[in-house]
Image (cartoon, helix red, strand yellow):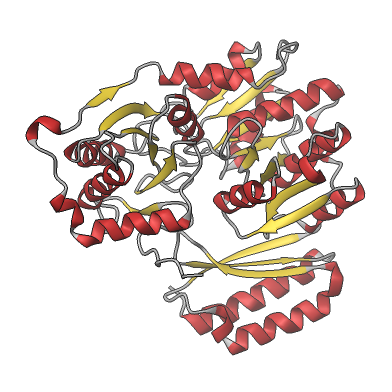
Amino acid sequence: MASQPARKLFGTDGIRGVANVDPMTTETAMLLGRAVAHHFSRGGHMGRIVIGKDTRLSGYMFEQALSSGICSMGANVMLVGPLPTPGIAFITASMRADAGVVISASHNPYQDNGIKIFASDGFKLPDAVEAEIEQLMASGALDLARPAAGEVGKAVKYEDSRGRYIVFCKSVFPKQRNLDGIRIVVDGANGAAYKVGPAVFEELGAEVIAINVKPDGKNINDRAGALHPDVLCAAVKEHRADLGIALDGDADRVIFADAAGEVVDGDAIMAICAHRMLERDELQQRTLVTTVMSNLGLERAIAGWGGKLVRTAVGDRYVVEEMRRGGYNFGGEQSGHLIFLDHMTTGDGIIAALQVLAVMLEAGRPLAELAAKMTRYPQVLVNVKVKEKQPLEALATVTALIGRIEGKLGGEGRVLVRYSGTEPKARVMVEGPDAQVIKDYAEEIAQALAHACGAA
């Protein structure tokens, strides 16, 4: 089989970087818009491309640049404004658009931005298609395909996109139930879900305390949202809420807090939902799909309930690809990307929260009690800034150290070392029964990596 062309712009989740610094420039965005329009408008068909964004200041310039590039190639643009990433995937599929473009750097600070693309079915593009688009951008072929002045496209703003997505989210909640009498803190991360997040739960009857829902272009993810659950936990205790829901900047992930203000992460949520789906024989092939980062305790719990866990590389796109390949319907990441393929094509923090609330109501039990189903192994994660991402297999000292530590842990622990797909960092994860021991192991590996790769 022929090898696929390499990607240089696209990483594990689209193109990402510091706004107004190569490659995240308006020039790149305009060229990308032209390539996307050309790719999805072949055969004389004038493509329709959805563009949505989160609340970053730089979103305005990228929205305009992408739109200009798309229109210049004869395709039309559907502008939906600030909307969660899964909302843009939903609009793309439901409006029968040819593709959807999301302008967001997800959980990153406002200085960063990114661009990711959905196909007409609402799924992220596979690596091979991203590589084709990159080749198109570099080939010069676009200059030969410019349409005449009377055939350029136009951009139209769709004002009802939020409402459409809110209605869709509510439709996945059991119709015979509501959230009357439940008090929920919703942290919108000053991001894309600052309006739709609180609205969904309020319209289902919950009493909502909304925090971090006043975006100013620069406060997205700033001491807010899924990456800062301590803020959510404090608010839950202050308002004596039944639970808290923290979304990230583009609302494709969610982290919870129970009534005592304790964090409930993606692994615990997968355990809660997978257990209920196994009980009801709703988990396809009795298999949960997650990444190499998920806790060993989740794997043991699923096995104890008669199920199976399949692991993938880090990144929700790889979880989704494995789910589609294997015919599975539920998967996710420890970080809070939770994918219910029966309802949505990508991670969706709001839909995940609704699934958890449905389990709580049906079981008549609080979140903390449900989360206790999984016994978590101690896990340590250390990030190492590196100057150069050298192949790990070429770092003899590091690989030898990892091998020795894995031998000491035996079957009661794991070591995972990988490079971030979006940042100049190496990530060291160690699991095992003794928290202090694995902490020492992780720091030892991190020091060896810093020495081998050059600390940034």
Residue nearest the observer in this picture, 362 or 187: 362
Q: Is residue 208 visible to the viewer in this orientation of the structure? A: no
Q: Position of residue 87 (x, y in %)?
A: 48, 29
Task: Relative to 139, say whether 152 is above or below.
Answer: above
Residue nearest the observer in this picture, 156 or 43: 43
* Quarter of the figure with the C terminus: bottom left
Residue nearest the observer in this picture, 235 or 96: 96
Residue lying at the far left of the rendered structure: 149
Q: Position of residue 374 (x, y in %)?
A: 84, 46
Q: Is residue 292 left or right of residue 314?
A: right
Residue lying at the far front of the rendered structure: 43
Residue lying at the far bottom of the rendered structure: 396
Q: Position of residue 376 (x, y in %)?
A: 81, 52
Task: Relative to 21, say whether 411 is above or below.
Answer: below
The part of the image, by quadrant, that contains residue 22 is: bottom left
Task: Relative to 430, say whether 296 is above or below.
Answer: above
The part of the image, by quadrant, that contains residue 66 is: top left
Q: Is residue 357 visible to the viewer in this orientation of the structure? A: yes
Q: Residue at x 85, y 64 (%)?
A: 433
Q: Is residue 309 left or right of residue 290?
A: right
Residue nearest the observer in this picture, 239 or 215: 215
Q: Residue at x 40, y 66 (%)?
A: 5
Q: Is residue 391 left or right of residue 150?
A: right
Q: Position of residue 328 (x, y in %)?
A: 71, 44
